[in-house]
Structure formats: C-alpha cells, structure tokens
Amino acid sequence: MKFTVLSLFPEILQGFFESSIMAKAVERGAIEYELVNIRDFAFDRHKTCDDAPYGGGAGMVMKAEPLSLALESVKAAGKRTVYMSPSGRKFDQALAAELSAEKEIIILCGRYEGVDQRIIDTYIDTELSIGDYVLSSGETAALVVIDAVYRLIDGVISSESLEEESFARGLLEYPHYTRPEVFQGIKVPDILLSGHHANIEKWRLRKSLEKTIKYRPDLLEKRVMTEEENNVLNDILRRETGEDLNGFNQSN
C-alpha cells in the first residue's frame, strides 16, 4: 500500500515513516510513501500558498492553484483522495479497515482556515475528521489516520494482536500485565497466573465489558451481543446498580 501525503510541512511527517514499526514495514516493501511539498507548486518567489477569504473573515485560505497542481502531479484522479477536516466524516476503526483495502491513499493536509472549496469539489473523495475538536495542523490528523490504517495491512502486525485490540470486537480491550508479579505492592490478578486459559478468557471478557460500560457505553448500544456477553453484562450491572442491562442488542 502507498500513502501519498500533500503538505505545507512534510518534515512533520517524515520522521514517522522512518521510525519503529512503520520503518520496518517500509523496508520490507509492505508500505510505500511519498511526501509532496505543496509549496513546490506555488508560482511566486515567496512560494505563497494562502490568501484572504472572499467575503471577509478571520484567517487565511489555502489557494486553489498550487493545490491543484500538487494533486495533478500525483495523479489524484481515480485514486482514494482524503482531506483532513474537522467538518468531515468521523474516522473510526471500520473506516480504517475500509481504507486499508486501497492500493494507494492520497491525503491532503489543510492549514489555516482550510482549503479553497473548489479543490474539495474537484478532487476530494472523503473529508475526514479524527474528532470533535480543531487542530492547527492537518499533518497531525493525517498521522492518526495513517497509523490506524497501515497497521491493518497484511504483514505489518500479527493477526493475533489485531484480533485482541480495542474495537476489533466492538469492545474496549481488557487490562494487560507483565513482570514483575508485584509492583509497588500491587499484585497481578491471580487468574492470569493460573494457566487456566478458559478462565482467563472469561476474566478478560468481563474486564473488557466493565471498561466499555465505564468509558464507552455507546459501543454496547450498537453491538449485537452474544448470550455469554449479555449474561456477563447483566451480572456486572446487578452487582453495581442492582439493575439488569435491558435494551442491548442480543444475538439470535
């Protein structure tokens, strides 16, 4: 898979592709990348890529001409082209999986008040937001998307690790422990030292559900629950509130 990223500050992105798991994926050929400096396509000697918005208002808008030339240089037409924008579609694990099936993703990083709308109308397939907040850097948002997507490519991370992660099953991940067995007087739960794999799996499911109830109960509302999960959920709620978990989707 190839990531092509258009940016006014490609140096922000460079280090990510040269570090850790990504660097190994690039070295093995599982991932390719190209960083395009939008300023290289500006006309004037100052490499101006922004101007005041028509109609007035605060801030500056990225100009259409250098953006168009930069996108044309990477042959954006016919390729999945994404623009990072706080007003875009909310990014999630399902969309990360969808994007991981593409051969190439082109990502346009915005700055200032954004880009000329004509660029979005002409070149952009998907406007993406990583959350309900505003960043000064489209590059930061682009790195979130790249990191979530590339790790789903075959050969980057083991399938076993991916299956255990938060959101892979629609739930948050259970807690993890490693050596030493006792740290600052806190002992690793006995069940994890028991060697009883079936009981460990039950414990992990319970902890996963407890964490999801606490931090992301909205995930449970969307999820079709198995009979076992519903039984555990009901037990958790009865212990904590004295009420049953009615209303969650159940499997047939």
Image (tube, helix red, strand yellow):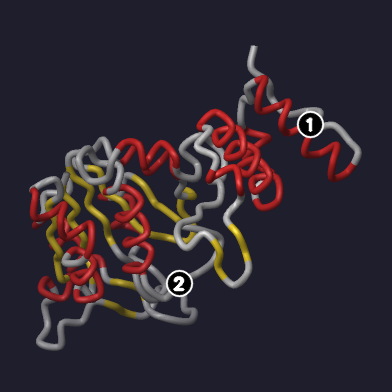
**In the image, residue 5 lies at what x, y percent?**
21, 60
Which of the 4 image quarters holds residue 226? top right
**In the image, residue 46 lies at what x, y percent?**
15, 88
The residue sitting at the bottom extreme is: 46
Residue 78 visible: no
How many C-alpha atoms fall within 10 Å of the one at disc 2: few (<14), some, or many (≥20)?
some
Q: Nearer the viewer, residue 138 or 150?
A: 150
Q: Secondary structure at mark 1?
A: helix
Horizontally, is 230 left or right of 117 in the view?
right
* Quadrant (top left/top right/bottom left/bottom right) for the N terminus: top left
Tell me the residue at 17%/68% (across/down).
66
Tell me the residue at 20%/66% (across/down).
19
Q: Does residue 198 sit above or below 214 in this rendering?
A: above
- Amino acid at the residue labelled 1: Asn
Residue annotated with mark 2: 135
Q: Nearer the viewer, residue 45 or 217?
A: 217
Residue annotated with mark 1: 234
Tell me the residue at 66%/28% (across/down).
229
